[in-house]
Amino acid sequence: LLEEIFLRLPPDEPEHLVRASLASKLWLGLLCGPRFRGRYHDYHGAPPMLGFLHTWLESWEDQGPVPHLTSTTKFGARIPDHERDYSPLDCRHGRVLLGDDVNQIPMALVVWDPMTGRRRELEAPGLVVDSHRAAVLCTVGGCDHRACHEGPFQVVFVCVGSKGDEDDDCVAYACVSLPETGDWSEPCPLFDPWGEPCPALLLPAETFFEPMPPVLIEEAALHFMLEVVDDDSVGILKYDLSSHSLSLIDAPIEGSQIATASILMAMEDGSLGFAHVSESTLYLWSRLMDSDGVASWSQRTIINLRNLPIQNPEESLRLVGSVEGRDVVFVTTELSIYGINVESQRWKKLWKRKKLHALIPYMSFYTIQKV
């Protein structure tokens, strides 16, 4: 009977689980047991958003050392001690990937588990880097990613650099770390070496990554937003996990200022999404395969944000992130930050006004642990 009651405690309000675990040793043992955890995850399905990380606009004042996980619940992340200040690069499968300034040599990366405070460090590959992004992934085949934050994982590092000859063109590379076993027993060991870089992909001159995390589509490919400075256009860099190769995808629209008003999405149906905001209107495209196996963009929906109860929807709207597989985008206005489901058009106010460049959600079930 107790287990049936505990199953119905909302996962996005983890304080109820904590209070129940403090009531007695019997309740603590029940809530920590693998049987209850498995049933709780099955009962509620996908993990909730317990908080988010964020990067600031360059014009915003110094916000102090990072990382900082802002809780949308009463979840308190266990912040690790660092000798450097780090910025969030990615967050997936219960883990956060942090990186230091690109100009620091050697460039350091850290995988952090906010649930336990444990971390792993590695040095980025020794490639010529003008711009870079990275992703962290669970490596367990067939995992549902509901409670794998302490399991095996690996890091994908993608960079763009100069060819080093008279041409102005850039080249892109990707490297993948060998799978980490997930043994967090040591305080902070280094990773195993990186694998060999994938074949280089030629890109136009003055190509850089947009400072947004990548999106993972159907556990098969990572997608990164690119900006080409010369013609103020955008592109999408795809890294295929199975073939260890890079390719370039055209965006569904063209024009100036596209990069600063657009984001990539991993849609609930498994397709790649592209969201763009213009004035008070949100446009959404998705990329699907036809019967001949050819992928193409199609416009999915148009949302007039004036129809939503958002304060001042016509002023300074920006897209700053999304939730993978949930059809949810994050929008900033002059007053607040909102999460909007593009299918149901339901919305939720998340945070006060801040000058954010990217908002990276932390999705995980809260885990009760015996001390």
Image (cartoon, rainbow, N blue to C red):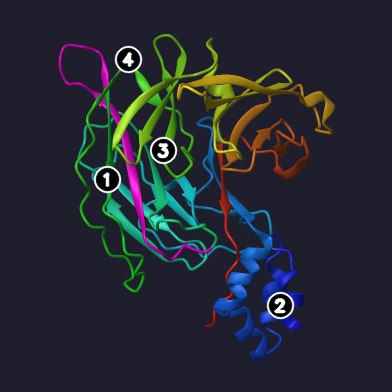
**Residue 19 image label:** 2
Q: Residue at x 52, y 57 (%)?
A: 144
Q: Is residue 197 located in the magenta-colored stretch of the structure?
A: no
Residue type at mark 3 is Ala
* Mark 4, residue position: 204
Q: Secondary structure at mark 4?
A: loop
Gap in Å between the C-alphas at discs 3 and 1? 21 Å
* Mark 1, residue position: 124
Gap in Å between the C-alphas at discs 4 and 3? 22 Å
Q: Earlier in the sequence, mark 4 or mark 3?
A: 4
- Depth check, front residue: 351 or 343: 343
Q: Earlier in the sequence, mark 2 or mark 3?
A: 2
> In the rendered image, which quarter contains the N terminus?
bottom right
**Residue 221 image label:** 3
Q: Earlier in the sequence, mark 1 or mark 2?
A: 2
Which segment is the magenta one? 147-170
